[in-house]
């Protein structure tokens, strides 16, 4: 197999090309897009989404979907907000642990309903999306967590130049991405997640505990959404019961799918998901830089997502043709 | 490894599908299982491979009693099942497909890619398969996938291999390759259970053959001590209800209403030709998968054909949809009653009158419920359909009564050609004989009937002529007078 051939086999090639196209196009329209500031903005915008996308990717690879992540994020964020009000000296690590635990429980509840009662995950998590959001209002009594409620050391987690002016939040999320990669690509468990999503019936016959695998994916997805709740509090400096995390599931799921994860399960990669989220981050930063009027931005954002998905499929199809052509 | 079973039995919701099976399997033998559909052979191998747990009896391995409650327990005892349709993970690599479920270490262990790739390569080359274990499974042929499933069984050091109709999805060339490997494994001491409908295959590969019929193990014989005719006799065995075929006046007129000329549907059936006369009941016999249903659906316009012509009343026709066929007077009672025959959550009356929307609605297109009740009650009374009221949901009726409703539905549209696909499947004996009477009456009124049935006594007691199909082709058209269960089976099984 030639190097060119191997290159064509890389699934992430499509999304990678789209990123290049978008960056070049944006730079031609306005050179301001190439400044360090824009890229800083991109790198600051993605950690929150990236962390959630890792969990969502696992869920989608094992043939499910979790729509409730926005509400899990909000619940974890509001919970940690109240912890900060009463115990302002709570350490970053303790806060991470608390939000992760809260998210884990909520993710597992999703997973248990899906596996135990055999209800489709879209329906289950559509229900818990509303249920968990309701809990946010009940627990908070509608009260917003303000900037002065959140301790300085938590705010600085996403602000200060920690290492070569890279914020700690980015380093932390990159570590989560690397761990996800190790699990998905190199661990027995990860391969069993792919097998379960690829063919659940065959996985069961091979002795894989499909229920356990599904619970793991929903648990991790919830846990990372919980952690994203802390990220949110740190980065935006407030938590609002009616606003925080609303609609974020759309961005996360879109990023995962654009990154090449099959909605029907069994395939997808951490690298692809990373690139998918990166693309969305770039578009998000590029739109205001390019002076696109505010009222158009949301529509154009959506349009680019749809175009990217179609273009990716087209590139994959062409690559496959090129490959089989060169083999013959 | 020696395996034997003692008085294995299996009951599903009160129905005894397997009784007192005493079966032995020796290392280094290929043991064929044969029997009609529903004879119990598939249930039996599912018990051996842990998919079902037996209701009665015990399984012994090397004289030690063992319990096989899950597929994993079976695999730990060295028993592997090769499925008829390979169970593959198309997104994963060949090596992963071989080792999935039994990789070294716990969940968070690193996958030893080098080891599993190397072992896979070794196993694959031992069965003569040249595939890079790192390749993705997607796009491999069924035959290769089947070989990879066998490789998976070898990687677990299986001693007993159960193959459930492994040759049915393969081409003759691929069957040859499979048999080379089966012979090789046999020489290495593997015990192999081999299910097949094709007697010539069994003859070329098996040492012994066990015949199942209606849930009983009838006999186990050495293959060279039993003839094909004897095997078929053991397979059929049941008593034949003697009902004479009813002649009728229409049939004597010899009026051909449907002429099928050399139609083919690539991959499913080839060169199908037959005539159907007014008042005739034309039986279609053959094994499941012989292509009978596909032919029926094609005539009804539910599937397309690639070659050939269909003539209806001497005019060439081509039904592009069931709608067109119905307009011309065709009707089709499908095999899968629940999925394709009834509108389950709709009332009996509405089901019956669903074939005549124009007759039950007024000029504004609104349904007139009085007409619905009137039209449907005619057949409800005529066929003794047992129900509480016409508004009862059809899914609450028994299978036999549902079937009567479906036939009523078509009779309301006055069909000239009625296609019945396994009309008495899952219907009790009483309703069955009522149904036979209805079919005979319809023929006497001039309806041309195509009757697909896997029950030979049914075909023999109803059909004037019998078309026998095998693997997508018509092997023989028999006149009722010359047809017996043995002759039909012969043309259905042996090429």
Image (cartoon, coloured by chain):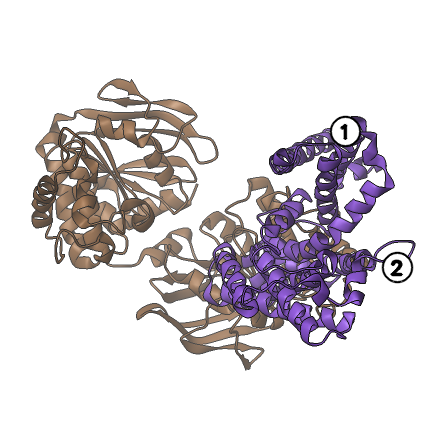
Chain colours: A purple, B brown
Tell me if A161 is positioned left or right of B264 in this view: right
Q: Quadrant of residue B316?
A: top left
**Label annotation for residue A321:** none
Kindly identify the residue that appears in the image at 37 percent across and 35 percent down. Answer: B474
Question: Relative to A227, is A121 on the left or the right?
Answer: left
- Within 10 Å of disc 2 (Cα), the crowding (few <14, some 14-19, many 20+) is some
User: Separation of disc 1 and disc 2 at Cα?
Assistant: 32 Å
Given the image, what chain letter belongs to the residue carrying mark 2? A
Mark found first going from the N terminus, 1 or 2? 1
Neighbour tally class for label 1: few under 14, some 14-19, many 20 plus, Cα within 10 Å: few
Residue behind mark 1: A25
Could you tell me which residue is drawn at 47 percent across and 68 percent down? B47
Q: What residue is rendered at 69% in x and 44% in y?
A: A259
- Locate residue A188, reporting x and y percent: 71, 63
Residue B72 figure quarter: bottom right
The dot on residue A162 is: 2
Give the farthest residue toward the right.
A164
Are the residues flagged by discs 1 and 2 in contact, CB closer than 8 Å? no
| Same chain for the residues under marks 1 and 2 in the image | yes
Residue B179 seen in the current view: no
């Amino acid at each position: 197999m030639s190097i060119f051939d191997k290159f064509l086999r890389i699934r992430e090639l499509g999304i990678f090309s789209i990123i290049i196209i978008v960056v070049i196009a944006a730079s031609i329209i306005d050179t301001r897009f190439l400044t360090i500031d824009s890229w800083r903005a991109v790198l600051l915008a993605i950690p929150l989404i990236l962390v959630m996308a890792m969990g969502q990717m696992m869920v989608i690879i094992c043939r499910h979907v979790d729509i409730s992540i926005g509400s899990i994020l909000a619940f974890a964020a509001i919970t940690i907000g109240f912890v900060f009000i009463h115990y302002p000296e709570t350490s970053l690590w303790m806060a991470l642990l608390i939000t992760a635990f809260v998210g884990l429980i909520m993710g597992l509840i999703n997973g248990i309903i899906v596996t135990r009662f055999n209800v489709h995950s879209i329906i289950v998590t559509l229900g818990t999306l509303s249920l968990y959001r309701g809990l946010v209002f009940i627990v908070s009594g509608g009260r917003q967590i303000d900037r002065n409620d959140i301790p300085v050391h938590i705010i600085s987690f996403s602000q200060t130049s920690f290492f070569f002016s890279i914020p700690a939040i980015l380093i932390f999320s990159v570590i989560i991405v690397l761990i996800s990669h190790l699990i998905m690509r190199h661990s027995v468990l990860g391969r069993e997640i792919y097998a379960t999503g690829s063919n659940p019936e065959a996985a069961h016959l091979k002795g894989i505990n499909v229920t356990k695998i599904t619970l793991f994916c929903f648990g991790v997805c919830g846990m990372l959404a919980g952690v994203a709740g802390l990220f949110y509090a740190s980065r935006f400096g407030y938590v609002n019961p009616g606003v925080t995390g609303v609609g974020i599931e759309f961005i996360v799921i879109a990023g995962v799918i654009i990154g090449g994860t099959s909605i029907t399960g069994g395939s997808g990669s951490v690298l692809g998901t990373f690139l998918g989220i990166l693309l969305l981050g770039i578009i998000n930063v590029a739109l205001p830089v390019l002076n696109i009027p505010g009222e158009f931005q949301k529509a154009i954002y959506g349009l680019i997502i749809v175009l990217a998905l179609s273009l990716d499929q087209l590139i994959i199809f062409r690559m496959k043709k090129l490959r089989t052509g060169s083999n013959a | 490894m020696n395996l034997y079973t003692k008085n294995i039995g299996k009951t599903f919701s009160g129905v005894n599908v397997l009784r007192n099976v005493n079966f032995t399997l020796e290392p280094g033998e290929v043991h064929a299982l044969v029997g009609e559909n529903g004879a119990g052979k598939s249930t039996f191998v599912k018990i051996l491979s842990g998919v079902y747990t037996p209701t009665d009896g015990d399984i012994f391995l090397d004289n030690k009693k063992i319990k096989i409650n899950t597929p994993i327990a079976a695999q730990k005892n060295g028993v592997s099942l090769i499925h008829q349709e390979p169970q593959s993970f198309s997104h994963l690599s060949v090596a992963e497909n071989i080792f999935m479920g039994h990789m070294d270490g716990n969940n968070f262990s690193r996958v030893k890619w080098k080891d599993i790739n190397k072992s896979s390569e070794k196993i694959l080359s031992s069965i003569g398969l040249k595939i890079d274990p790192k390749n993705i499974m997607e796009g491999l042929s069924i035959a290769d996938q089947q070989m990879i499933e066998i490789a998976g069984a070898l990687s677990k050091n299986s001693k007993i291999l159960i193959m459930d109709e492994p040759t049915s999805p393969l081409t003759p060339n691929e069957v040859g390759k499979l048999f080379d490997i089966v012979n090789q494994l046999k020489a290495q001491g593997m015990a192999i259970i081999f299910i097949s409908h094709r007697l010539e295959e069994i003859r070329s590969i098996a040492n012994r053959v066990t015949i199942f019929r209606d849930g009983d193990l009838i006999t186990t014989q050495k293959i060279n001590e039993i003839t094909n005719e004897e095997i078929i006799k053991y397979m059929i065995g049941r008593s034949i209800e003697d009902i004479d075929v009813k002649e009728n006046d229409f049939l004597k007129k010899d009026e051909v209403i449907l002429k099928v000329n050399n139609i083919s549907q690539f991959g499913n059936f080839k060169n199908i030709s037959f005539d159907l006369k007014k008042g005739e009941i034309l039986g279609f016999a053959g094994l499941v998968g012989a292509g009978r249903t596909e032919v029926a659906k094609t005539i009804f316009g539910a599937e397309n054909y690639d070659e050939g012509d269909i003539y209806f009343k001497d005019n060439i026709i081509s039904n592009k949809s069931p709608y067109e066929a119905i307009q011309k007077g065709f009707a089709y009672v499908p095999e899968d009653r629940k999925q394709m025959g009834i509108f389950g959550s709709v009332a009996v009356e509405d089901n019956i009158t669903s074939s005549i929307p124009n007759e039950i609605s007024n000029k504004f297109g609104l349904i007139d419920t009085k007409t619905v009740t009137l039209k449907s009650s005619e057949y409800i009374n005529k066929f003794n359909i047992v129900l509480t009221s016409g508004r009862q949901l059809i899914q609450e009726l028994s299978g036999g009564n549902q079937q009567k409703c479906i036939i009523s539905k078509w009779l309301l549209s006055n069909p000239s050609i009625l296609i019945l696909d396994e009309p008495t499947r899952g219907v009790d004996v009483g309703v069955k004989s009522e149904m036979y009477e209805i079919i005979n009456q319809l023929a006497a009124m001039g309806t041309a009937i195509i009757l697909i049935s896997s029950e030979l006594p049914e075909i023999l007691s109803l059909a004037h002529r019998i078309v026998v199909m095998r693997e997508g082709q018509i092997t023989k058209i028999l006149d009722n007078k010359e047809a017996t269960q043995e002759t039909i089976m012969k043309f259905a099984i042996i090429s």
